[in-house]
Amino acid sequence: MSTSHDEKHASESQEVLDSFDSLQDKQLLRKLDLRLLPILTLLYLLSFLDRTNIGNAKIIGLTTDLHVAPPQYNTALALYFVAYVIFEVPANIILKRFDPQLWLPTLTLVWGIVSICQGLVRNQAGLFGIRFLLGATEAGLFPGVIYVFSVYYRRHERSWRVAIFFGGAALAGAFGGILAFGIGKMDGVGGRKGWEWIFILEGVLTVAVSLLAYFIVPTWSHRATFLTDSERARLLARLKFDSDAAVEEKFEWSYVLQAVQDHLVWAYALLFHGYAFVLYSLSLFLPTIIAGLGFSSWQAQLLTIPPNALASLSIWFTVWLSSRFNLRAPFIIGAAFVAILGYIILLAGPTPGAQYVGVHFAAAGVYTGNALLLSWPGENVSGQTKRAIAVAMQITIGDLGAIAGVLIYRPEFSAHRFRKPHIIAIGYISFAVAVTIYLWVSMSRENKRRDLLVADQAGSEKRSPDTAEDEAEERKLGDRSVKYRYVL
């Protein structure tokens, strides 16, 4: 009897899912993509460009002109992430209580101004202060955008969009190499150094885009004015069936507590901690690593382009495969092994050319793994406030790994091609693999346990029909509901 009921329920659920993949829905998704993805990806590209261009500025004279000793340069990099960690969760709480249409462009405007100021600093203290301010002002963009995606797309639709969005980080590396090569030739123009122009011109670009963003970045889905009434109703209906995204949830501190007490939320954060070490040490030190292979500074600027371009392609292809199979864990683990292979080649390669090949493997694996893991809590944490906090916690704790990365890639190790830091990087990626396995096993067991509970309830005579009260309780339970299933 219960088997028959389960089959009927599964059939009905599949019919509903199929009804939300009609031509009308595909047209709606295209409209959403055209409105959200170009502007939000551009904002993240600029964010990553403005935080990592210091690596390009370093190899054309920043540390020499400001009289910044090599260890203090690492401290300046770390201060950015200290601020990022401090302001991450508060920024997402502000977003939840206000409006992304105003909050995200304002963040972009402010960090663009701060980025310009990086080109105006005159000493080490100024560099320390401006890097801290940059971290504080950029902290809210990434978790804010991930949260906005969660109120516009169904769970299985988000990973591909997050991948396109995160691809902006890899593109920023390629784009930054080209810009740094060209802008660096402005050395002496207006009495300023080439590295100063890198910060000033790229900051001006960010400010210009931020002003445009006020007219393009959308508000919450239930108030989206770029959709017709019928399109908005359709959007909310498909979200309601899939998750809590269509509900206008009132902020409550109990939801924050739910996030803090969930072991899976902490595991997502630790997973990014492992990957963030390699993401930021690689992106910030890539020009230095390549220059250390024996290439001149201008060659190193240009040679950052191919590995970053490959990383973008790897992100998009792998996440497309991941979406087709509706699996995340095995692809995150696979990306980790590609990254580890890259670091091994960097360590053991007999020639600069072979080691440069290792850079490509490392970049592809690191960026791809990050793109997959950063969309995972957005798919698996239900309850709007809980999800906002979970995403912010993931980035906050993850960026502690970034702090470790920029402090461990110290100048005294550069003479040995960063041998010790590369070995430590392999250890961090291995830790990320272990956390991924923990998440995979934990969620798989929980899905099976809930399947059994639902089957038992279906066969029980005491089972009552769904009511509005039941729906409200389900929303309150979020991902703790017996009906909720995790994406593995």
Image (cartoon, grey):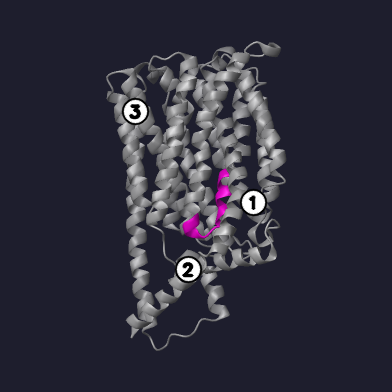
- Which label is found at residue 95? 1
Q: Residue at x 53, y 74 (%)?
A: 473
Separation (CA) of disc 3 from disc 2: 43 Å
Please tell me whether the stretch drawn in magenta is mainly helix, strand or loop. helix
Identified by mark 2, the residue type is Leu
Q: Does the residue at mark 1 contact the one at mark 3 (Cβ under 8 Å)? A: no
Which tag is nearer the camera, tag 3 or tag 2?
2
What SS does tag 2 mark? helix
Separation (CA) of disc 2 from disc 1: 30 Å
- Which label is found at residue 194? none
Q: Is residue 134 left or right of residue 350?
A: right
Q: Give the range drawn in magenta.
A: 142-157
What SS does tag 1 mark? helix
Classify the position of the C terminus by image quarter: bottom left
What SS does tag 3 mark? helix
Is residue 139 placed above or below 475 in the rendered structure?
A: above
Q: Where is residue 457 in the image (x, y as percent from the top left)?
A: 39, 80
Q: Position of residue 400 (x, y in %)?
A: 47, 39
Identified by mark 1, the residue type is Leu
Q: Position of residue 230 (x, y in %)?
A: 66, 66
Asked if residue 152 can be seen in this view, the reply is no
Separation (CA) of disc 1 from disc 3: 40 Å
Q: Name the residue under label 3.
A: 358
Q: Residue at x 58, y 17 (%)?
A: 184
Q: Name the residue under label 2.
A: 17
Q: Residue at x 47, y 85 (%)?
A: 464
Identified by mark 3, the residue type is Gly
Q: In which quarter of the image is residue 38?
A: top right
Which tag is nearer the camera, tag 1 or tag 3?
3
Which comes sooner in the sequence, label 3 or label 2?
2
